[in-house]
Image: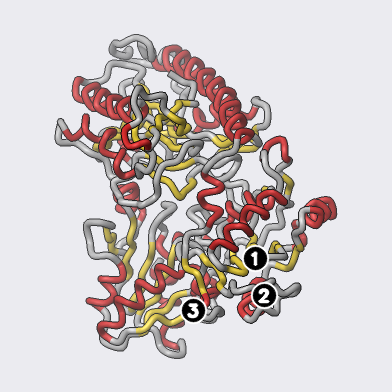
């Protein structure tokens, strides 16, 4: 890491203007949560492998910000050159930069890897001391990354109507109606799952996420897909053309945004008093925004975020069927694992309670590890219809490792299964008709009274949220307390959100809805999905989490105060 930091500081010094600091975000050009191997720049410079975080490099310091899910993991992965900054506990990165960097400091960032909202927030913070955000013309990390993984050309596939439930033509019609309502003549779509959902395409450009590296521009009378054309077969091009979508080169989006601004993108949009360009400030890159006339930009959440989150009947049916198959695989796994723990380790078993025998029943050469058991789980899933892969790396964690919320076991260093320790397994799969996400926590021997009390509190919170009935217009942060109250009664809590949306053969983490202690003004709607996953973690000892996927449904209440209508949850995870 020292050599990488030294090389970056040399580039910072020779940059025009010289940079006092360099920001290295986790995100790619599409502000993705999960990125491809060649886009893991923050991981490359810091060694921290978590999915969320931001690195800041100055001439004398190297700092890494991340959230509560990764505090323990970051302390284990960061080397001595780095300082961990805990989000919501330490000063935010923009506050730190404004307070600790000199007046007139130049802070560099690749504008493709930072959103409009983030860049503007930083610029406001920097203005107090005449500091400035400098958009680098090239990514400095890429210049020092000698063995950066190459560009892959995985094929684009069509998500057929039998799984999508709505055609591209129908989706474009609804999108253009929203453009007209907002007096916009065009929209720039940069989020990978929104592009995939809108055009009914899928891919494998990002591990575990069936998306394609692509942008989209839609105007009142045209639609474009910007993608590496080597990935697109003639059949897919024909499908898109029949749907009214023109395929263009990935890099052409930059020049086409300039043409879009001046209404010279062929064919020109029918303006009729609508002269705004719509861009989502949380997902559109600052690089693209900088090519627009800021007075003519509608900075507002993408209309596709909500449209994608509210599942149509075909998507809901597919999700439920996928969860039935996935549930069968999980049950097969539990039965297999329980038997193995008894036969190999002398465990009393998942359905009984008792001390494991002192010695293994089999030879010491026979053992189970966090990785070998997770591989077995994947094999059970792979046997199911429409299986397309995992939806994220399986969190298969024993004892102290379970306290690392997003622990990722590696075959060389993973722990052996232990009948006298808690085992937490958070896993999910991609099926062509739906995406799954489930967590269960096991003990195959005799848990302590404290472990049982903690598990029971987590379970109570899980049940309380899953059984909630609430009025239309309720936001997720209002519901979050239901899952925490049983833990709070013991003075316990957890540092992650309680629930997130789940895609329809798309990203396992899907917005805009969430159930979290962080306020987010997005009401919960019928036909949305949400996970229910409270937990509790003791560093160095154990971790507990329970997770189901829920579908929001209309509640059949006796009364209807205020004529609001009430909502409830339907559990679609079928594992007890």
**Which residue is pictured at 35% across the width and 22% down the height?**
558
**Which residue is pictured at 51% across the width and 42% down the height?**
508
> Residue 451: x and y, percent?
24, 25
Q: In the image, is 93 to the left or to the right of 375?
A: left
**Which residue is pictured at 63% across the width and 29% down the height?**
382
**Does residue 303 appear anywhere in the picture?**
yes
Residue bearing mark 3 = 294
Please, what secondary structure does the residue beneath circle 3 have? helix
Q: In the image, is 435 to the left or to the right of 350?
A: right
> Residue 404: x and y, percent?
34, 42
Of 498 and 554, nearer the camera is: 554
**Which residue is pictured at 81% across the width and 54% down the height?**
242
Q: Please say if 425 is above or below 132.
A: above
Query: 10 Å neighbourhood of mark 1: few (<14), some, or many (≥20)?
Result: many
Q: Are marks 2 and 1 in contact (CB under 8 Å)?
A: yes
> Quadrant location of residue 457?
top left
Query: 10 Å neighbourhood of mark 3: few (<14), some, or many (≥20)?
Result: few
> Residue 344: x and y, percent?
44, 16
Please, what secondary structure does the residue beneath circle 2 have? helix
Q: How many numbered markers are drawn?
A: 3
Kindly report the distance in space between the C-alpha atoms of the residues bearing marks 3 and 1: 18 Å
Discs 3/2, front: 3
Q: In the image, is 280 to the left or to the right of 542?
A: right
Q: Earlier in the sequence, mark 3 or mark 2?
A: 2
Q: Earlier in the sequence, mark 2 or mark 1?
A: 1
> Residue 42: x and y, percent?
44, 63
Query: 10 Å neighbourhood of mark 2: few (<14), some, or many (≥20)?
Result: many
Kindly report the distance in space between the C-alpha atoms of the residues bearing marks 2 and 1: 9 Å
Residue bearing mark 1 = 217
Residue bearing mark 2 = 256
């Amino acid at each position: 890491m020292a050599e990488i930091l030294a090389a970056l500081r040399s580039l910072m010094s020779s940059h025009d203007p010289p940079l006092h600091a360099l920001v290295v975000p986790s995100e790619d050009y599409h502000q993705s949560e999960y990125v491809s191997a060649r886009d893991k720049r923050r991981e490359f410079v810091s060694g921290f492998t978590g999915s969320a975080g931001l690195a800041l490099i100055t001439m004398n310091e190297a700092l890494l910000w991340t959230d509560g899910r990764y505090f323990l993991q970051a302390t284990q992965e960061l080397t001595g050159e780095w300082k961990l900054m805990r989000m919501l506990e330490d000063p935010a990165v923009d506050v730190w930069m404004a307070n600790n960097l000199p007046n007139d400091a130049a802070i560099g960032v690749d504008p493709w890897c930072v959103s409009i909202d983030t860049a503007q927030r930083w610029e406001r913070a920097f203005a107090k001391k005449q500091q400035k955000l400098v958009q680098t013309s090239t990514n400095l990390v890429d210049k020092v990354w000698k063995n950066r993984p190459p560009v892959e050309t995985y094929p684009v596939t069509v998500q057929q109507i039998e799984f999508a439930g709505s055609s591209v033509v129908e989706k474009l019609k609804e999108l253009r109606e929203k453009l007209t309502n907002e007096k916009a003549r065009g929209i720039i779509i940069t989020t990978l799952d929104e592009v995939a959902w809108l055009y009914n395409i899928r891919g494998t450009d990002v591990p575990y996420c069936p998306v394609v590296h692509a942008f989209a521009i839609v105007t009142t009378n045209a639609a474009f897909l910007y993608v590496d054309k080597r990935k697109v077969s003639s059949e897919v091009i024909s499908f898109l053309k029949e749907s009214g979508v023109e395929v263009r080169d990935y890099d052409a989006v930059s020049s086409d945004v300039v043409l879009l601004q001046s209404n010279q993108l062929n064919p020109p949009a029918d303006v009729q008093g609508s002269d705004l360009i719509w861009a989502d400030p949380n997902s559109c890159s600052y690089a693209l925004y900088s090519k627009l006339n800021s007075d003519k930009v509608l900075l507002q959440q993408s209309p596709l975020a909500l449209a994608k989150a509210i599942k149509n009947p075909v998507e809901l049916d597919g999700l439920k069927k996928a969860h039935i198959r996935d549930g069968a695989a999980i049950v097969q796994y539990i039965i297999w694992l329980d038997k193995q723990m008894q036969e190999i380790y002398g465990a009393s078993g998942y359905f009984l309670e008792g001390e494991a025998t002192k010695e293994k029943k089999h030879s010491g050469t026979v053992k189970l590890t966090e990785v070998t058991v997770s591989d077995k789980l994947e094999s059970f899933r792979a046997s199911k219809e429409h299986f397309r892969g995992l939806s994220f790396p399986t969190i298969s964690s024993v004892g102290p490792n379970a306290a690392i919320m997003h622990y990722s076991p590696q075959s060389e260093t993973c722990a052996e299964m232990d009948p006298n320790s808690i085992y937490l397994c958070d896993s999910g799969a991609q099926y062509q008709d739906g995406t799954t996400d489930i967590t269960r926590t096991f003990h195959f021997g005799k848990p302590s009274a404290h472990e049982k009390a903690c598990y029971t509190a987590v379970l109570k919170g899980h049940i309380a949220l899953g059984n909630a009935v609430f009025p239309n217009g309720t936001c997720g942060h209002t519901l979050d307390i239901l899952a925490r109250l049983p833990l709070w009664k013991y003075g316990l809590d957890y540092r992650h959100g309680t629930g997130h949306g789940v895609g329809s053969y798309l990203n396992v983490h899907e917005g805009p809805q969430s159930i979290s202690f962080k306020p987010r003004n997005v009401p919960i709607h019928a036909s949305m999905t949400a996970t229910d996953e409270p937990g509790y973690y003791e560093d160095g000892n154990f971790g507990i989490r329970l997770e189901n996927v829920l579908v929001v449904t209309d509640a059949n209440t006796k009364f209807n105060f205020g004529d609001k209508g009430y909502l409830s949850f339907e559990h679609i995870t079928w594992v007890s």
